Amino acid sequence: MIMNIKHCNHKATMNHKATMRSWWTLCAIFCSIASSLTPSHAQDSSGGLPNDKIMKVPLTPPTRPNTKTIRVATFNAAMNRKTEGELSRGLEQGDEQAAKIAAILRAVSPDIVLINEIDRDDRSAELFLNRYLNTRLTPDQPAWKYSYAGTVNTGVDSGLDLDGNGKLHEPNDAWGFGAYPGQYGMAVLSRFEIQQQQIRTFQNFRWSQMPQALRPMNPSSDGATPKSYYPDSIWNQLRLSSKSHWDVPIQIGNQVLHLIVAHPTPPVFDGPEDRNGCRNHDEIRLLIDYISYDDSGRYLVDDQGKAGPITAQSQFVILGDLNADPLDGDGRSEAIRKLLEHPRVAKYPTPQSQGGVEAAATSQGANVKHKGNPAFDTGDFNDKNPGNLRIDFVLPSSNLKVLASGVYWPSKTQSPESKALADASDHRLVWVDIEL
């Protein structure tokens, strides 16, 4: 292009007509360059659908004077890629899936959202915000100005043989399963200011530091005492969090709302020792201990060296794909049930959708034997096993007033276009309206 520009400038010296012709050519070239650098075309950032075809979720009005409604959401967007940097390169070039994810977020319009499974590097969250999410906003729709995408354990090589196969430096040997550092990462996106200096992270917290941890054991066939799957040399180094656990404070007017976020490992892809089932249980238990009134969380020490749980007066929302269904699936469900029943967690009607009911009825398979209400499902998974599950959660603290909630999973009857849009991920966005 530089050569063409120089050529046009040279031709422009010949006569007035040539000058005008070259001037327009030059403009076209610069417009072409500019368009290639523009974040994304309007059509691309809408997920391929006009705005009037996408089912919107209106915000619930507050019930008290001098208060406001804040919508908080969690969404496993499945924006993970096979190689390091692949997501960012795709976001620069134009990513159809990311455009659909952005369209869903604009349709629900949460003020604060946790994105699970967005590969982390120095650019991915910012690229998604600027080139996809903050485009095609309606006049009354504020932009998402703030983000936090901290480091995670996935893909970070432990240097140890964690799966005991005699090999090192494999995805199973990372502190959290992953092919490269940051795969399956997390990001918090917010319209309100994030108190970056006050964030607490528990990425490096060791599993063995948890009292009465569920240490995976190899079962014994002859009645002998089971032996630990992990030798002491590994167990004493092993990190609990497969990604990380974060406490992210958000400043909303004169109040602070704490986002307590995580993405525990799936309780599968292991053996009879149930190492991932045990880890999932204890990752959720960390959330329970962190919010408990009693001394349950005194053992916790964050990556900055601060000890103890969140204060008893704090307002919080627990967010994340917790990979645990309270009634169905392969996990140790006692941990997620205990979290849902915790006295510091608000009791409100379970978020639901029509699309979940429709999907379970259409898919049949494992869904037929499920105990849970399919309206509560948040993931559209393999029909044979495990079927659709409720594993994504938005759990406000009991000192917050919950106004409404839902799962963004439109049925074909509600909106066939939005139903197709929701298939951008195998998970569905879960939202809750709270009053502050």
Image (tube, rainbow, N blue to C red):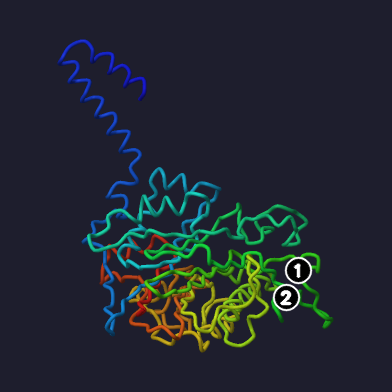
Estimate the x, y position of residue 431 in percent, counting from the top left. 38, 73
Describe the element under mark 1 as helix, strand or loop: helix
Q: Amino acid at mark 1?
A: Trp
Seen from the viewer's position, the closer of residues 58 and 331 is 58
In the rendered image, residue 248, in percent from the top left (x then y), is placed at 50, 68
Q: Earlier in the sequence, mark 1 or mark 2?
A: 2
Instruction: Please state the horizontal and vertical placement of residue 105, each as a whole percent of the image.
Output: 35, 63
Q: CA distance from mark 1 to mark 2?
A: 8 Å
The quarter of the image holding the C terminus is: bottom left
Residue identifier under label 2: 215
Name the image quarter holding residue 31. Answer: top left
Viewer-closest of 429 and 421: 429
Q: Are marks 1 and 2 in contact (CB under 8 Å)?
A: yes
Residue carrying label 1: 235
Q: Quadrant of residue 191?
A: bottom left
Write the residue at 74% across / 65% down: 237
Q: Disc number at residue 129?
A: none
| Image coordinates for residue 213, horizontal then vertical, percent | 70, 78
